[in-house]
Amino acid sequence: MEIKGRVHEIGAVQQISETFKKRDLIVEYAENPTYPEYLRFEAMQDKTSLFDGLKVGDEVEVSFNLRGRAWTDKTGKTSYFNSMIVWRINTISNNAGAGATPDYAPPIDLSSKPGDDDDLPF
């Protein structure tokens, strides 16, 4: 599976045991920009280095596998967990929008006297 979004947070590498490490990446996914969603992806073992070159604000395309598992507690209640495991990540643009000049109309000089090149009807 693949999804495009903006890097919101990059977690530190967590050494779970001597032989297992993981790292989280939070991506802002805005299918509907009014209600963005924050998705947590995980990288494990040697894939944790995939997040090394990323910065908050980068636009990325994340390739991942969706995994799910069941867990039954002592009372017999079963809970289900999902994980999105990253296997590739491509940077689309670095810090998109950061420091960029917006495409606005040039500013208007309001200090000129009325009637000086004023073609407004009011």
Image: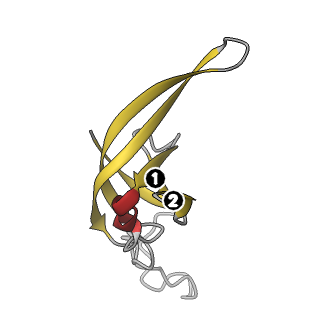
Q: CA distance from mark 2 to mark 1?
A: 5 Å
Q: Residues within 10 Å of mark 1 (few under 14, many from 20)?
A: many
Hey, what amino acid is under mark 2? His
Residue 107 pos. (x, y %): 46, 80
Q: Is residue 101 above or below residue 47?
A: below
Q: Which residue is mark 1?
A: 27
Point out which mark residue 8 bears: 2
Position of 105 compared to 23: left or right?
left
Could you say whether the residue bearing mark 1 is in a helix, strand or loop?
strand
Q: Is residue 119 above or below residue 64?
A: below
Residue 112 pos. (x, y %): 54, 88
Residue 54 pos. (x, y %): 40, 70
In this view, the residue in front, 119 or 92, is 92
Position of 57 compared to 2: left or right?
right
- Splitting the image into 4 quarters, where does residue 51 fall? bottom left
Position of 47 compared to 11: left or right?
left
Q: Is residue 55 above or below residue 109?
A: above
